[in-house]
Image (cartoon, rainbow, N blue to C red):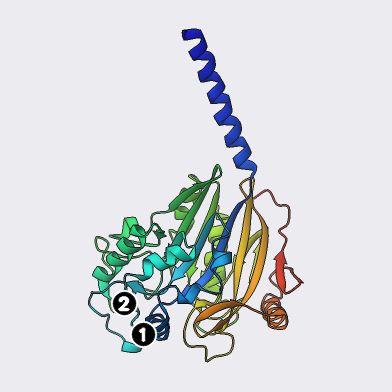
């Protein structure tokens, strides 16, 4: 009897190892989107049309992935003390939005930005609690400096994907205190070591930065410097946001930098380009970034919507223009963009 049990155990171990190897070879699909605002004008649309309204035209793609991630540009709470800034720039959305984000297909949300603390530390912790309770993981903010900068790890199909988030801007209207809730802020002196340490515990590391100049289509030197430091120390892809418009794409030592994905769910599309964005569909193969597809979108009445053929080509052509001299080659086919990475051993 013991002999049969031993044989069975060995068989099960071999089976588990074989399945793990098979899953490891399956591509991990990740969808990235830009800024998500659920307050102000978007909040008014939600009150009229329901919490699912912002995602109605796009949730099919959001759900067609292993991980879908965006930058949440507001607090999710019904309380908190407003920060000391213009009322029109204070963003807070109802707690019911958390479940709607999950239903739309979101798995992960970055909170390292300049609006997460719009309603104070109470509003920040409510945001984390409501989002996590809805089944969505968060990174880039926490109950103190240590937890705010802590990497998030998710294991999918045998591949461990890591996330780090940093804001280049301090929380507006607050003093930074190490033992109090806040967002993770970029420290260029420690950035390399933070990235290197995070990479030790995952196969692929995604670093998200909230940075840059609003409405500018080109990254500034501080963005390039931070991105290059992160990639030199183990990051595999950089995802940026905050400018509210698309910024150029760079390939640095065989690794992609998306300096800004622009808006995703947003209300005010006044300056040129704020109603245009791209959704990234990235595949991870054998612990490396493989295929990258760019899906051009237009924001219409606060809803991201797949751009038609003509608009889609125009959006991608402009992104290609913004990317000139950055080593990226965006291949436009059938109103979709494709980026092939060099065969670097990165």
Labelled disc at residue 260? none
Give the labeled residue for mark 1. 89
- Specify whether 207 is left or right of 330: left
Residue 337, given in percent of the width and then of the height, sits at 71, 70
Judge whether 203 appears above or below 219 on screen.
Answer: above
Relative depth, front residue between 253 and 272: 272
Relative depth, front residue between 280 and 51: 51
Q: Is residue 185 visible?
A: no
- Specify whether 73 is left or right of 317: left
Q: Are marks 1 and 2 in contact (CB under 8 Å)?
A: yes
Judge whether 178 appears above or below 159 on screen.
Answer: below
Residue 125, given in percent of the width and then of the height, sits at 28, 64
Judge whether 122 appears above or below 308 on screen.
Answer: above
**SS at mark 1 in the image:** helix
Residue 144, given in percent of the width and then of the height, sits at 28, 60
Q: Tell me which corner region of the image, top left, top right, bottom left or bottom right, holds residue 229.
A: bottom right
Labelled disc at residue 118? 2
Badge 1 local density, few (<14 within 10 Å), some, or many (20+)? Answer: few
Residue 30, given in percent of the width and then of the height, sits at 57, 58
Relative depth, front residue between 251 and 116: 116
Q: What residue is shown at x 28% (from left), y 60% (from top)? A: 143
| Gap between marks 1 and 2 measured at Cα | 8 Å
Q: Is residue 92 visible?
A: yes
Q: What residue is shown at x 49% (from left), y 52% (from top)? A: 162
Q: What residue is shown at x 43% (from left), y 63% (from top)? A: 102
Q: Tell me which corner region of the image, top left, top right, bottom left or bottom right, holds residue 26.
A: top right
Q: Earlier in the sequence, mark 1 or mark 2?
A: 1
Badge 2 local density, few (<14 within 10 Å), some, or many (20+)? Answer: many
């Amino acid at each position: 009897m013991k002999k049969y049990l031993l044989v069975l155990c060995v068989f099960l171990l071999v089976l588990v190892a074989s399945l793990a190897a098979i899953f490891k070879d399956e591509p991990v699909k990740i969808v990235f989107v830009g800024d998500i605002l659920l307050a102000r004008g978007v909040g008014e649309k939600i009150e009229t049309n329901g919490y699912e309204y912002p995602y109605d035209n796009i949730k099919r793609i959001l759900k067609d992935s292993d991980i879908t991630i965006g930058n949440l540009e507001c607090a999710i709470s019904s309380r908190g003390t407003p920060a000391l800034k213009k009322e029109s720039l204070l963003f807070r959305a109802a707690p019911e939005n958390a479940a709607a984000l999950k239903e739309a297909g979101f798995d992960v949300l970055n909170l390292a930005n300049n609006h997460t603390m719009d309603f104070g530390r109470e509003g920040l912790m409510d945001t984390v609690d409501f989002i996590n309770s809805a089944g969505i993981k968060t990174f880039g903010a926490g109950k103190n400096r240590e937890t705010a900068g802590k990497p998030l790890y998710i294991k999918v199909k045998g591949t461990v994907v890591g996330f780090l988030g940093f804001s280049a801007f301090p929380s507006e209207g607050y003093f930074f205190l190490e033992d109090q809730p806040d967002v993770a802020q970029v420290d260029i002196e420690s950035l390399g070591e933070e990235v290197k340490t995070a990479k030790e515990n995952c196969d692929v590391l995604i670093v998200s930065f909230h940075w840059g100049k609003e409405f500018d289509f080109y990254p500034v030197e501080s963005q390039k410097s931070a991105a290059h430091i992160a990639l030199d120390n183990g990051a595999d892809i950089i995802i940026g946001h905050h400018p509210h418009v698309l910024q150029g794409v760079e390939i640095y030592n065989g690794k992609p930098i998306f300096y800004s994905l622009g808006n995703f769910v947003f209300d005010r599309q006044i300056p040129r380009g704020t109603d245009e964005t791209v959704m990234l569909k990235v595949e991870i193969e054998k612990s490396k970034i493989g295929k990258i597809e760019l899906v051009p979108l237009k924001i219409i009445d606060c809803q991201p919507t797949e751009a038609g053929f003509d608009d889609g080509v125009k959006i991608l052509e402009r992104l290609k223009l913004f990317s000139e001299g950055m080593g990226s080659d965006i291949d436009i086919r059938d109103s979709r963009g494709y980026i092939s990475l060099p065969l670097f051993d990165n």
